[in-house]
Image: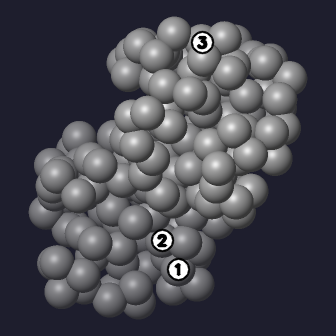
């Protein structure tokens, strides 16, 4: 996995952790946005993992939410214990999107079409499109077959 991919995944993870910290602290996006002197839209981009934030901004969020700054850099940090369906759903949705982006990239690098991949799996091309957009989870057996067909390492899709 290339450095830009790792950075994008790290941004997504940081966004999830920011949202988790904010919700645990009982704060709104508007509150944190005001404290950071950014728009609520921009803060939403931080939480969605679509935009990177500076270290001082992350430090301020940590202070406002009562979390140590290291929480956002801890490889073992988890939001699973939160117990809210919304957070779990968001994590699963982001994982599906990451797998989808990686699938599209591997398919394009292997010069394969969605139709060819669908024929391999005996499914409709629309399903491949849904996988690539993160709308649908790729079953492990299909992902394994695609890994072989697209000639990528088995750990390529690990998120």
Camera sees residue 84: no
In contact (CB < 8 Å): disc 1 and disc 3: no
User: Is there CB contact under 8 Å for labels 2 and 1?
Assistant: yes
- Tell me which residue sits at (68%, 21%) in the image: 64
Q: Where is residue 81 in the image (x, y as percent from the top left)?
A: 69, 12
Q: What element carries label 3?
A: loop
Q: In which quarter of the image is the C terminus?
A: top left
The disc, 1 or 3, on the residue closer to the chain's N-terminal end is: 3
Residue receiving disc 1: 129
Residue 139 position, x and y percent, is 52, 51
Residue 76 appears left or right of 85:
left
Does the image show residue 64?
Answer: yes
* Foreground pick, 131 / 133: 133
Name the residue at 38% across, 22% down: 73
Q: Residues within 10 Å of mark 3 (few under 14, many from 20)?
A: some
In front: mark 2 or mark 3? Answer: 3
Q: Disc 2 marks which residue?
A: 132
> At numbered mark 1, what does the secondary structure look like: helix, strand or loop?
helix
Rendering coords of residue 62 (x, y %)? 57, 21
Circle 3 is placed at which residue position?
67
Label 2: few (<14), some or many (≥20) within 10 Å? many
- Eye-nearest disc, 1 or 3: 3
From the viewer's perspective, is 131 left or right of 47?
left
Residue 119 x, y percent position in the rendering? 40, 82
**Picture quarter containing residue 108?**
bottom left
Left or right placement of residue 7 versus residue 76 in this view: left
The front one of 130 and 30 is 30
For marks 2 and 3 on the same chain, the one whose residue lies earlier in the sequence: 3
Residue 145, picture quadrant? bottom left
The secondary structure type at the circle numbered 2 is: helix
Is 133 or 136 nearer to us in this picture? 133
């Amino acid at each position: 996995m290339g450095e830009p991919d790792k950075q994008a995944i790290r941004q997504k993870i940081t966004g999830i952790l920011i949202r988790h910290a904010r919700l645990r602290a009982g704060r709104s996006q508007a509150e944190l946005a005001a404290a950071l002197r950014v728009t609520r839209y921009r803060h939403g981009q931080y939480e969605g993992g679509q935009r990177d934030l500076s270290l001082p901004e992350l430090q301020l969020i940590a202070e406002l939410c009562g979390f140590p700054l290291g929480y956002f850099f801890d490889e073992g940090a988890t939001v699973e214990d939160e117990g809210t369906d919304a957070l779990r759903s968001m994590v699963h949705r982001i994982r599906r999107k990451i797998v989808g982006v990686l699938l599209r990239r591997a398919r394009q690098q292997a010069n394969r079409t969605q139709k060819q991949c669908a024929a391999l799996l005996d499914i409709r091309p629309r399903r491949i499109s849904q996988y690539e957009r993160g709308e649908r989870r790729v079953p492990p057996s299909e992902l394994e077959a695609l890994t072989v067909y697209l000639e990528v390492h088995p750990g390529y899709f690990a998120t």
